[in-house]
Image: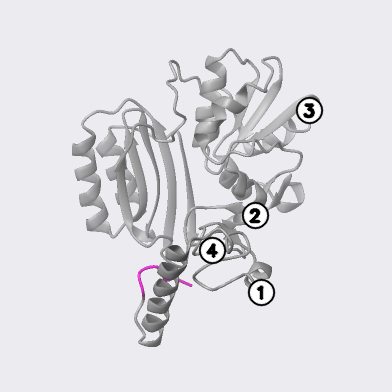
């Protein structure tokens, strides 16, 4: 059994290369896979490892970054390793907004139960701060889709909002809506709230019968999507465009296993098609010989 551990922390960090080296040693020692992004503004990660190593790994992470607790963390059990490999990246921002935020104000988090009450109040608008394709997989009833292809597009979208509006924002694990909240609060918005722990925390804490969530929640690992109680969904990933696809999509005449799907079959170049077909051929050869090809999903 494996743990899938998501976490983030907004904190001024220095000596990033040294911290990356310490993380690398931790990854190797504990066979950790997944991604951790570090920057001068903090860290953000989702990693997977054997369940019996949880205490040791989380203690080591906090020691490396000299923190007592994360802004938020979520933990899911899964029977397979959720990632193909481990990556540690140094970036300008842990989640790229593209603008500087002077003051980080985070006194506006709502628990899942508080969120349910909040979204029923009058004149409240819900904003999904995730990408457009994530919104299509699932979202809260009545939420607004800004149709973002990148989180950097959010500052442009905010210009359509009014400062006296009561706004609730949400994302997968909490970091995007928290940073969006910081941004709006710095721009003079007063009634801005965010879902604590994001959608993952909501699906973990709220029963389906009491839920305002519709569909699945897209996640950036081998599960592809999750449902209530954090159970894996039924979606898979197109090997061409890397967007989620349904079982119905795989039966389409425009679907080619390991190559393309109805969303991208007419958008790929000949070079891409050739490369993807070669990759799929290698996967089939590996399966036939009983070996695991690097990009083969663990199911």
Q: Earlier in the sequence, mark 2 or mark 4?
A: 2
How far apart marks 2 and 3 lie (CA) works out to 24 Å
Front residue of 163 and 152: 152
Which colouring convention does the figure follow? one colour
Q: Which mark is residue 238?
A: 4
The x and y percentages for residue 270 are 47, 65
How far apart marks 4 and 1 lie (CA) works out to 13 Å
Farthest residue in the bottom direction? 289
Asked whether the viewer can see residue 297, the reply is no
| Residue under the point 57% across and 47% down | 200
Front residue of 273 and 156: 273
**Crowding at label 2, few (<14), some or many (≥20) Cα neighbours within 10 Å?**
many
Task: Confirm or deny contact between disc 3 and disc 4 (CB under 8 A).
Answer: no
Taken as a whole, is the magenta stretch helix, strand or loop? Answer: loop
Task: Confirm or deny contact between disc 2 and disc 3 (CB under 8 A).
Answer: no
How far apart marks 2 and 4 lie (CA) works out to 17 Å
From the viewer's perspective, tell me whether residue 264 is left or right of residue 278: right
Looking at the rendering, the stretch of residues picked out in magenta corresponds to 293-299
The residue at which mark 2 appears reads as: 216
Is 171 drawn above or below residue 274 in the view shown?
above
From the viewer's perspective, tell me whether residue 67 is left or right of residue 299: left
Asked whether the viewer can see residue 268, the reply is yes
Q: Earlier in the sequence, mark 3 or mark 1?
A: 3
Q: Earlier in the sequence, mark 4 or mark 1?
A: 4
Task: Confirm or deny contact between disc 2 and disc 4 (CB under 8 A).
Answer: no
């Amino acid at each position: 059994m494996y743990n899938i551990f998501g976490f983030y922390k907004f904190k001024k960090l220095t000596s990033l290369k040294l911290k990356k080296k310490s993380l690398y040693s931790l990854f190797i020692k504990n066979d950790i896979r997944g991604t951790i992004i570090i920057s001068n503004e903090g860290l953000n990660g989702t990693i997977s490892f054997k369940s019996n190593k949880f205490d040791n790994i989380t203690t080591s992470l906090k020691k490396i970054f000299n923190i007592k607790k994360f802004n938020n963390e979520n933990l899911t059990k899964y029977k397979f390793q959720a990632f193909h490999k481990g990556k540690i990246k140094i970036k300008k921002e842990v989640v790229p907004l593209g603008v500087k935020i002077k003051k980080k104000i985070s006194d506006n988090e709502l628990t899942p139960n508080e969120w349910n009450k909040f979204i029923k109040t009058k004149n409240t608008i819900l904003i999904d701060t995730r990408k457009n394709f994530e919104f299509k997989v699932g979202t809260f009833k009545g939420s607004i889709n800004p149709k973002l292809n990148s989180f950097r597009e959010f500052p442009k979208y905010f210009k359509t909002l009014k400062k006296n509006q009561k706004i609730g924002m949400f994302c997968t694990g909490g970091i995007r809506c928290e940073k969006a909240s910081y941004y709006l609060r710095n721009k003079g918005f007063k009634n801005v709230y965010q879902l604590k722990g994001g959608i993952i925390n909501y699906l973990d804490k709220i029963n389906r019968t009491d839920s305002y969530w519709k569909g699945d929640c897209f996640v950036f690992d081998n599960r592809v999507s999750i449902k209530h109680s954090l159970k894996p969904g039924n979606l898979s990933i197109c090997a061409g465009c890397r967007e989620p696809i349904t079982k119905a999509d795989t039966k389409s005449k425009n679907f080619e296993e390991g190559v393309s799907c109805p969303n991208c079959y007419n958008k790929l170049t000949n070079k891409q098609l050739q490369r993807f077909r070669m990759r799929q051929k290698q996967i089939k050869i590996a399966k036939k010989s009983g070996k695991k090809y690097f990009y083969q999903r663990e199911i």
